[in-house]
Image: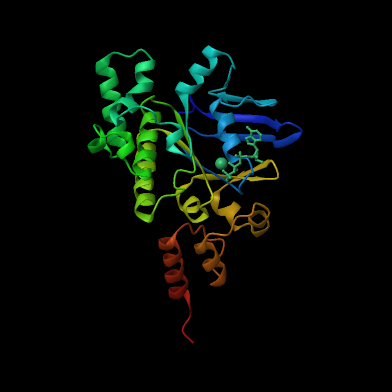
Amino acid sequence: MNQHRLSAKGIEVRFGSRTVLQDIAVDIPNRSRLALLGANGSGKTTLLRVLSGAVKPAAGVVSVAGDPVRYNRAGLRTHRQLVQLVTQNPDDQLFAADVFRDVSFGPLNLGLAESQVRARVAHALQVLSIEDLAERPIHELSYGQRKRVAIAGALAMRPSVILLDEPTAGLDPQGVDEMVQALASLQADGTTVVISTHEVDFALWWADSAAVLVDGRLVCGSAGDLLADTELVAQARLRQPIVLQLAAELGLAGRGIRNVAGLSAAVAESGSNRQPA
Ligand SMILES: Nc1ncnc2c1ncn2[C@@H]1O[C@H](COP(=O)(O)OP(=O)(O)OP(=O)(O)O)[C@@H](O)[C@H]1O
Ligand SMILES: [Mg+2]
């Protein structure tokens, strides 16, 4: 199932005389979940824009299923059908009067029949659990609801890969839970999901793999390995996930702990292995 694998190699981006991304390589398996981590200004949004085709790198190649992106009208149109970017601020993306019209905009633009557009919108709203919002004016919706509508708009294009720039930023705890649910549904629906985030605890338990931007370069690996690397975490101006800090305090580091349940199981196991005095 690698036919829509998104990858990039040798990517370099400069703004004026400043090099923001340098020799970036990333390979994102089909149906996987990748968390892109890094400090403010480290280049997360820029890299997502490169992967989506919105920014043409000064050097390097972005490809889907081995086919390099062509930066002409037809090439970018093809690429955007496969790889959709959802911006951090939903208001940069939503412009129709109501939810149904906004989510149907992309499929209508593809020239699909009305029945197909309706089916795509219904499916996208259902995956995001926002069927009840279909008739609502966009301006009445909460920030978290608008974020989910923006994702539904991307999903209605039936992409292989959805790139989400800070999907949990600015959401309250309930909003984060709803977003987590939405991300799980996206993946269950067969979509590869890439998110940028500063939320290390979330990245640790959610992601299959992670990539950390430090000084314009990208370090890829498992979220557990990268976030356990105290030097890398400090260089990237992140912090270690709480469960990894606790695991280290309790002498349980290196056990693949990703969340509270994993930590609790490791604590129970270490207790049961303890010899009576
Ligand atoms: N269009 C642009 N023109 C000039 N500089 C830019 C442009 N876009 C981004 N930059 C610069 O590139 C660097 C990376 O910015 P980017 O927005 O990609 O960072 P980020 O990791 O997404 O940050 P944040 O966590 O704050 O969202 C920053 O120094 C930014 O000022
Ligand atoms: Mg950003």
Q: Residue at horizontal 33%, vertical 36%?
A: 139
In the rendered image of this protein, does residue 180 appear above or below residue 122? below
* Ligand 2's quadrant: top right
Quadrant where the image shows the N terminus: top left
Residue drawn at (34%, 42%), measured in percent from left and top? 145
176 vs 220, left or right, is left
Q: How is the image coloured?
A: rainbow
Residue drawn 35% across the image and 33% down it: 152
- Judge left or right: residue 27 versus residue 21: left
Spot occupied by residue 239 in the image (x, y as percentages of width and height): 58, 59
Judging depth in this view, the residue of 238 and 9 nearest the camera is: 238
Query: Where is residue 253 drawn, in percent x and y?
Result: 56, 64
Query: Looking at the image, how many numbered discs can be counted on the residues?
Result: 0
Determine whether, in the image, residue 127 is placed left or right of residue 225. Answer: left
Q: Position of residue 120 (x, y in %)?
A: 30, 24
The one nearer the camera, 116 or 207, is: 116
Rendered location of residue 71, percent (x, y):
59, 17
Q: Residue furthest right?
A: 17
Residue at the extreme bottom? 277
Query: Where 4 sits versus 269, above or below?
Result: above
